[in-house]
Each structure stands twice: as C-alpha cells, then as structure tokens.
Amino acid sequence: MSRIGKRPITVPTKVQVAIDGTKVVVKGPKGELSRDLPTAVTVSQEGETLQVTRRDDTKSSRQMHGLCRTLVANMVEGVSSGFQRRLEIQGVGYRAQVQGRNLVLNMGYSHQVQIVPPEGIQFAVEGTTNVIVSGYDKEIVGNTAAKIRAVRPPEPYKGKGIRYAGEEVRRKAGKTGKSGKK
C-alpha cells in the first residue's frame, strides 16, 4: 500500500467537496478547482475526511494512488489557504514592480519585461527585489514562478539573476591572472 496514498485528507469546515465519478470539485473561500482523476483510483468522502483508494493492484494503479491523493490534498489546501512562491532578485540595477496586475521587471535588458498573470494569480513585491507569486492552484503558482525565474536565471560567476528564496546557486571560480607559463 502506498504510504502517501493511504493517508486521509482532512477537509476544513469552509471547504465543500463534490465527487462525481472520477471528477472531483473543491470549492472554498479562495476559489474553485476541479480535476478529472484516472479510473484506477476512487475518492470517497466520510464526514470531514477524504480517502483515496485504488481499484486493483496493478503497477499503473499503484503509481497513480499517491499522486492522486497529493493532487486532491493540494486542491483542498489551495482553496482554503492558498499557495505562494517567493523569488529574490540579485544584481545591480535589477528590480521589480507591480503595475496594475502585471509584474514589470528591469533585468538589464534594453527593455522592461512585463509578465501578465494567469487567472487566479497575484503578484506582490517587497522592496524592489523580492517577488511573491500567490494563488490557489499550486501548479499554476509554480509554473508562473518558473517563468519569472527564466527571464534571467542566476548565473554561476557572480550569482546575478532571479532565484527562488533559499535557492543556493553553485558558484564557479572565474579566470585567474597570467600564470607565468608561455
């Protein structure tokens, strides 16, 4: 049995879950998410908990068991409390600001880079170098943060660029002076 898959999911009081065959719809104060799960797993609700079980013991259903439990748990957590990803900008003259809903980045290019948020995503900037991407769908929050990081990934020599908060960038030694060999 999957250690992750057999754990029950507790549903907060402000969240409603509707199960229709393989489709799971979760509504909460932050929004509404729905997902079609594979037929190898079933979701059942018993009071304030959800349980994900697999139909048989084939390899594909064992693979899907823990994955589907995690996806449903992320849906419940997202509509109740939401997710956020923090990014740090390092480099002289590199900065970010929010204009309306859009994020505008000055990253040393000849132009400003403007990022339009997908539905359900909000941007916030602390100071000028800390960007917060928040929303209720964990997948979209992570993808949006990855797109922002891809504008100027951290380079290994000086460490300049956009990185996730807490990310360690492996640094390389630069060129040394003349070695004296001819």
Image (cartoon, rainbow, N blue to C red):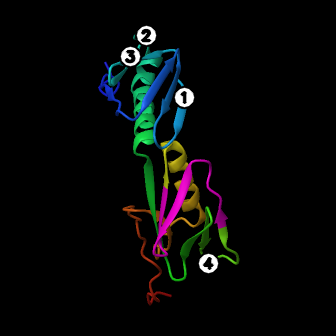
Of pointers 3 and 4, the one earlier in the residue sequence: 3
Q: Amino acid at mark 4?
A: Gly
Which residue is at a point 54% across and 30% down the rendered structure image? 34
Q: Which residue reaches farthest right?
A: 111
Q: Is residue 118 magenta?
A: yes
Q: Which residue in the structure is indicated by mark 3?
A: 53
Q: Marks 2 and 1: in contact by CB < 8 Å?
A: no
Q: Which residue in the structure is indicated by mark 1?
A: 35
Q: Which residue in the structure is indicated by mark 2?
A: 55
Q: Quadrant of residue 3?
A: top left
Q: Element at badge 2?
A: loop
Q: Which residue in the structure is indicated by mark 4?
A: 108
- Residue nearest the viewer, comparing 76 with 175: 76
Q: Amino acid at mark 1?
A: Arg
Determine the CA span between mark 1 and mark 2.
18 Å
- Residue nearest the viewer, comparing 95 with 80: 80
**Magenta stretch in the rendered image:** 114-133
